[in-house]
């Protein structure tokens, strides 16, 4: 499961070695100014990802990597049994980060509180 770290300036998604291998990508750091919001996704979230280039896709087990479709470029790191958190971005290489976490609602609330300054 990706480890999320947040402070007053940035959100960092730290991946394990296995997650890096599955996603064919390293850790990701985004400035808080690029984040427009965070939300919890429903159970059919993976159906709206688009084309995987590159990464790993075993729906229901592991979904990781970069997914693209018209107007959308998502980085995904999720494994079965994890809730799904989406972080919406602007002005960055990705339009959203989709990660599997233990408590997506708490993370969404935390990220939204950081970006609104509350």
Image (cartoon, rainbow, N blue to C red):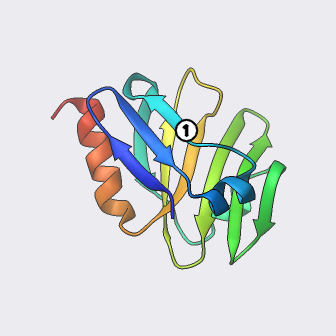
Q: Residue 13, relative to residue 82: is it above or below?
A: above
- Rendered residue at 49%/34% (across/down): 29
SS at mark 1 in the image: strand
Q: Residue 94, relative to residue 78: is it above or below?
A: above
> Where residue 64 sits: x, y (%)?
70, 58
Image position of 104 (left or right of 99): left
Image position of 47 (left or right of 44): right
Q: How many marks?
A: 1
> Where residue 91 sits: x, y (%)?
56, 20
> Where residue 94 sits: x, y (%)?
63, 33
Quarter location, residue 68: top right
Quadrant containing the C terminus is top left
Quarter location, residue 73: top right
The answer to which of 70 and 28 lies nearer the viewer is 28
> Where residue 16 sits: x, y (%)?
57, 58
**Which residue is tagged 1?**
28
């Amino acid at each position: 499961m990706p480890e999320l770290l947040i402070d007053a300036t940035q959100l960092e998604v730290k991946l394990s070695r296995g997650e890096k291998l599955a996603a064919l990508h390293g850790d990701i750091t985004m400035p808080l100014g690029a984040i427009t919001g965070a939300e919890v996704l429903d159970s059919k979230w993976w159906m709206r990802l688009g084309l995987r280039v590159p990464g790993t896709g075993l729906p229901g087990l592991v979904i990781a990597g970069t997914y693209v479709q018209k107007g959308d470029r998502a980085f995904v790191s999720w494994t079965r049994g994890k809730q799904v958190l989406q972080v919406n971005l602007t002005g960055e290489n990705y339009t959203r980060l989709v990660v599997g976490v233990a408590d997506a609602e708490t993370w969404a609330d935390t990220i939204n509180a950081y970006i609104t300054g509350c």
